[in-house]
Amino acid sequence: MKTAVTTLARTAAAMHFADQMALVAVPILAALVFDASAQTIGLLVACQSLAHLLGSLPFGLLVDRHDLRHLAVVSVAISAVGATGAALGIAFQALALFGISITLAGFGVVLFGLSALSILPRSEPVSALSAANARIELPRAFNAFLVPLAVGLIATADTATWLFPVVFLVLLWGLQQVRGLPHYPVQKVAKQYNVIKRLRDGVQFVLGHSLLLSVALCAIFWNFAFAALLVAMVPAVQILFAAPAATFGFAMAFFGLGGFLGTWTSRRIGAWVAPKYVLVFGPGSSALAMGVVYFAAQAQVTLPLYVAFFFVGFGPAMWLIAQNSLRQVVAPTPMLGRINAVIQTAIYGVRPIGALVAGGVVGTMGPQAGLALAWAAFGLSFATCLFSGLRRINSFTSLAGDAA
């Protein structure tokens, strides 16, 4: 009999395949199909993550008040419609349709992620949350390795037309899987509620909780840096490394391999390694790796680039699982959807800003300046964790006792 975690893991495999295809293929296809400038690449990367900025908070309200199974099913359907539009945009070289469809598909990813984060604490005890989070993150990490590698090998102007039709077929399989989830009844509220007040309550809880605030700030700087890196890398590969654009796909494959091994490692050691080490190591490894990328570009050598991208994936994958468990432990169940939404907004909502800023920097000052911008933001992310209460969390079990 399939458990809720098994069903979520299978559905997550389809959703993350689609999300990674958008993440990696958008900058490459923008250059190959649309002959896009750095500013246009930045705009398309912003479209891919814009859904997190616009959808997280309202979707958080939905998650707190509606059957989570229904929301999970709807989320996969939304992404399937977005994949269809993206395929049509490529086929007809309609840049606007492509960008809008990528954004729509992102809305599905946001809704699924928030639904899954609220389902897990209703299905698993606190002691099993870390392993459960790792299990549903493993498909993300695997796809983060597989998809960039495949795109790097096969992406050309001729093959571009069938990348998103494949995504659509995978999402149809995911839709079949997610229907196996049980229903999750919600507590009915007799009186009318104020939407703005409920959103404000979630924001205030995060701002008033020192650990969650530190997680949010770390995520803001890290994801700003990551979006800037995505925008800067394709021009950097072509201009600074003097390599083909597909090199970016291979670098992202190493990023995915690092994420996969980081997730696997977290699942194996999460029960006996203190969370404080993981919560500092994740952003710290990114800052160090970005320094390697910056100097590798100056030396025009690609091997250090691949190693650096591996560690940008490895440490943050472990950090993501740890902070997911952290917020599931300290957040009150009736507010979990809204609190997750606030953190998700911080994690992903800043990416459009980072992409647009980096597009402007790269377009006016060159890709080396874009890499420097990403390095500085990764450093701020590390400093936020290092000088916060995150470095003092010894176990989630004791944290649950303190929260109770």
Image (spheres, rainbow, N blue to C red):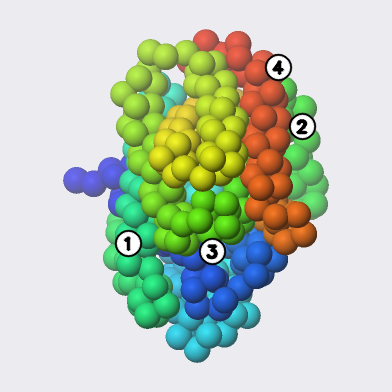
Mark 2 or 3, which is nearer the eye? 3
| Tag 3 near tag 1, CB within 8 Å | no
* Rendering quarter of residue 356: bottom right
Q: Is residue 186 above or below residue 331?
A: below
Which of pointers 3 and 1 lies earlier in the amino acid sequence?
3
Q: Nearer the viewer, mark 4 or mark 3?
A: 3
Instruction: Please tell me how crowded label 4 is: few (under 14), some (14-19), or many (20+) other residues with Cα within 10 Å.
Output: few
Tell me the tag on residue 153: 1
Circles 2 and 1, Cβ within 8 Å, touching? The answer is no
CA distance for labels 3 and 1? 15 Å
Q: Which is more N-terminal, label 3 or label 4? A: 3
Q: Residue at x 52, y 82 (%)?
A: 89
Residue underneath mark 2: 207
The answer for how far apart the CA atoms under marks 4 and 3 are is: 35 Å
Q: What is the x, y in percent for residue 236?
A: 58, 53
Cα distance in 3D space between marks 2 and 3: 34 Å
